[in-house]
Amino acid sequence: MTSPRVAPGLLSWAAWSVLRDAPAVTAPAGHPQLPALAAAGITVTISPAAPSDGVWLAPPGYAEVPPGARVVQASADLPGAHLLDLVATMDRLRAQCPWDAKQTHLSLAPHLLEEPYEALEALESGNLEAFREELGDVLLQVVFHARIASDFDIDDVADGIVDKLVRRHPHVFGEVTVADAEEVKRNWDAIKKQEREERAVARGAGPVAPSVTDGVPFGQPALALAAQLQRRAARAGAPDSLVTGDAGIGGELFQLVAKARDAGLDPELELRSAARRYQDRVRGWEQSAP
């Protein structure tokens, strides 16, 4: 038995030994391993069913083992191999489904916001099965946009994040030594700062260091936005007095974000939790009200 996600011919040594020593090798027509076996000089008889003796190459997806047979797992999936199925499925949908074929980056843009929130809601509910399903919907958005793009593909997306992770973890992939997680965080921030400066120079902005707030997405919810701005500023050593620079309700909310941050809490998640508790109280009131 072989995995359809592993290139034909990349079989285990045990599998090659069994194939070479077998009195006969049989396989269904069109089996993906046939060219590799032919190149290795192994004669294969074409048959749709398993023979009574010898080696039979099970077709992809085969699960029913004949009585008395010994299964040799000739190739197995590596972790993450099933992502190839998603890429292949997306390719087929773009080619054969009218709805998928007409989608664009802009038409899918609302889902970039909706799907992560649905995943967060499933996580907050404690239903890990639902959370797993919603993570799949989030992953679909990544693969869908990569498939639509004309100047990059899913491998470019993967290469980009791998390069970033390697670059920002020199204590894992380089010679840097760290004492604890806090030092990892400081190194991460220093590397990001250097990257922003290099991008500024590349844009022709000169050697002037860009703001620590560059890159903060203002399209996110206001509480999350305020928290991210404050975290960035705090890491850069900005004084706490800057938080109290505004008056009015907006300023008070901004200061509450700082209070949550000082307590080690995420203001967005705290307000979401309060909203859920309020919803429960309203439902209880609705059920008890005359």
Image: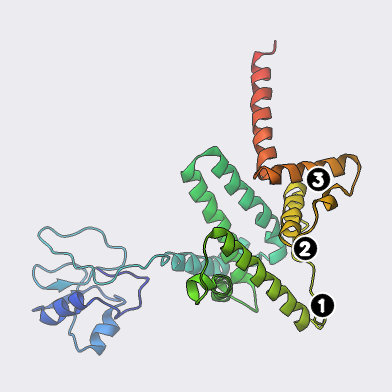
Of tags 2 and 1, which is closer to the observer?
1
Where is mark 1, residue-wise? 208
270 to 85, vertically: above or below: above
* CA gap, disc 1 and disc 3: 29 Å
- Look at the image and tell me whether residue 170 can be seen: yes
Q: Position of residue 271 (x, y in %)?
A: 70, 38
Which residue appears at 51% of the width and 70% of the height? 177
Q: Position of residue 240 (x, y in %)?
A: 80, 51
219 to 160, vertically: above or below: above
275 to 228, vertically: above or below: above
Q: Tell me the kind of residue under disc 3.
A: Phe
Upstream in the sequence, badge 2 or badge 1? Answer: 1
* CA gap, disc 2 and disc 1: 15 Å
Circle 1 — which element?
loop
* CA gap, disc 2 and disc 3: 16 Å
Q: Quadrant of residue 279?
A: top right
Q: Tell me the kind of residue under disc 2.
A: Thr
User: Callout 3: 10 Å neighbours few (<14), some, many (20+)?
Assistant: many
Q: Tell me the kind of residue under disc 1.
A: Val
Q: Position of residue 29 (x, y in %)?
A: 27, 75
Upstream in the sequence, badge 1 or badge 3? Answer: 1
State yes or no: discs 2 and 3 in contact (Cβ < 8 Å).
no
Where is mark 3, residue-wise? 254
Which residue appears at 82% of the width and 77% of the height? 208
Q: Nearer the viewer, residue 63 or 274?
A: 274
Where is mark 2, residue-wise? 213
Q: Quadrant of residue 262?
A: top right
